[in-house]
Structure formats: C-alpha cells, structure tokens
Amino acid sequence: MPRSSQPFGRSSLGQAQSDRREVISGPAGNLRGAVFMVAAMAGFAIEDMFLKAAARHMPVGEVITLFGLTGTIAFILLAIRQGDAPLPPAMLSRPMIIRSGFEITGRLFYSLAIALTPLSVASAILQATPLVVVAGAALLFGETVGLRRWLAILAGFAGVLLIIRPGLEGFDALSLLTVIGLIGFAGRDLATRAAPPALTNMQLGVAGFAMLTLAGIIILAVNGDYRMPDRVGLGLTLFATLFGVAAYTALTVAMRTGEVSAVTPFRYTRLLFALILGATIFGERPDAWTLIGSAIVVASGIYVLTQNRRA
C-alpha cells in the first residue's frame, strides 16, 4: 500500500533514487540488494494479508484510516530519528501536491481492491505498474523506448486483460479497482521524478501514509460506516503497519545496494508471496487464465527492466 513512489508497489524506485544512495558494487552488492528486495516484497504481501483480514472485522474505511495514522506516526518518528523534519516546506511544492493527488488515488483504490477482491488477483494486476511508468516516461518525458520494449509493454497490458477478462464469463467489475489503483501509483511514480531531491525516503513515507489516512477518511465520509474497532481488527491493523514499515525499510536498503537494474526485477517475488498467502490464508484458487496473465505481466516487466539496463 504505501506502497510503494515507484514502479514498484506501495514504495518506490523513484523514492529511493531521490534519496542518497550508497551503492555496494559487484556481485556481492547485487546479491545483498536482491535479498533485501525479496524481504521487502514478502513484507508488503504480509501487510496486504493483514489489511484484508482486518477488513473482515472493521469497515474498510476505518481500517485504511487507522493503518494510515499508525504508519504516519511511525515514519514521523523515523524521520526525527535520522534528523529530518517530518514536514519540510518542500512538501507543499507543486510536484509534491500533484504526487499527493495520485497517491490518494492509488492507495484508495488499491486498498479497496485488497479488501474486496482476491489478494492474488489484486497483486497480479498491480505488477503492471512498472509497464505503465515506462510508457508514461516515454510519452511525458520523452524517454527513449525501443520497439521491443513497446511490444513487451503491450504484452503486459494483454496479460492484465487476461486476468480481469472484461465482458467475458468470470469478469469481476471490482477488479477494476486495482486497475485504477495502479494508474494512481504510476502517476505518483512519475510525479516523484519531479519531486524536490532534498526529500528523504522517511519524509516521502510521511507524505504517503498521510495520503492513505486521507483516503480512509474519504471512504468513511462516503459510506458513514464507523464503529469502535474491536481488539482483533485493531491488532491486525497494527501488525500490517509493523510489516509495512519494515518492508519499506528493507526496500530502501535494497535500492541503495548494488545496481538498481539488477535488484529491481526481484520485486516481482511479491506476486509469488501473494499467491501463497491467498491460497493458504484465504483459500483463494486463481484459475488458469489468471495464472497465465500473471506470468505474461511478470515476464513483460522483467524484460522491460533488463532491456532498460542494457540500453
């Protein structure tokens, strides 16, 4: 969820690059970065699992609001610990305001998707975010994207269509929540490129979770469904926050270790963790078309990332 400014879920490559990077070069650095990236993706998948479970005990808007508040407090404390102002003036810059708008959209709709649709399906669709980011960078920033990468991007989009199957039997309109969410995350990632470089990962974390809190408040205002949280729901939400913050920290370490293009493909392990958790915890059984579409999205994303490295 907070996931990833990024082409990479609730945190991001864009965020990590906007902060100071201490690259450990060579195979050892790439291996260390890959290990931390896998750990981060496992953490984000577990975070999503706890949020989905919490939504069975409390209204969705209430879960998102509590998750956003606890995450905001956690990142404020982390920012203070490393000597950063939690809310610097740069937060009110035009790029950050635009970024916040996309952040709300992404977090709002992806959080709803986690609560209302199978975890494995939502995670599979979200894996197309890097493809949208690359396409957006080409169209908005004039970055060079060769024919092969354009074909890979189109193949990835076709994979998403196989997962949601619009107009066909098995189509679930709620899966479009994730599509809107990934567009929001992609817009956030692109806007992050223009964000003031002085902003650190912890400060961007404060902004991200603050927007998540606002998204939860919007849901509560619309449906008016609020009640005192029970102990189980509150506990699940707190566990989601712990894993979310830990995963974000691991992601930051991963993106500061080794080569970015060598480390980032491992972010697709998040889908594997989501499939395992969805099956074991929620009894989800993705059909063949969902699995095929997921494989196409992942393969397309890895190809685009590795081709970018060669370029």
Image (cartoon, helix red, strand yellow):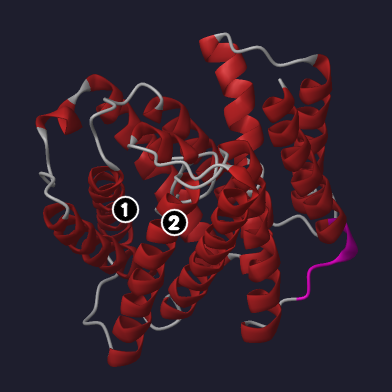
Q: How many marks?
A: 2
| Residue in the picture at 29% in, 49% down | 205
Q: Is residue 298 magenta?
A: no
| Residue in the picture at 56% in, 50% down | 29
Q: Position of residue 275 (x, y in %)?
A: 70, 70
Q: Three-letter amino acid code at disc 2?
A: Met
Above or below, 290 against 100 in this view is: below
Q: Position of residue 185 (x, y in %)?
A: 48, 40
Q: Which residues are magenta?
A: 285-289
| Residue in the picture at 39% in, 83% down | 57
With 95 as the anchor, is 23 left or right in this view? right
Label 2, residues with CA under 10 Å away: few <14, some 14-19, many ≥20: many
Q: Nearer the viewer, residue 287 or 87?
A: 87
Identify the mark nearer the N-term, 1 or 2: 2
Q: Position of residue 106 (x, y in %)?
A: 45, 44
**Visible residue check, residue 11:** yes
Residue at image mark 1: 212
Q: Quadrant of residue 157?
A: top right
Q: Quadrant of residue 91?
A: top left
Residue at image mark 2: 1
Q: Nearer the viewer, residue 246 or 209?
A: 246
With 265 as the anchor, is 244 left or right in this view? left
With 190 as the anchor, is 273 left or right in this view? right
Q: Is residue 288 magenta?
A: yes
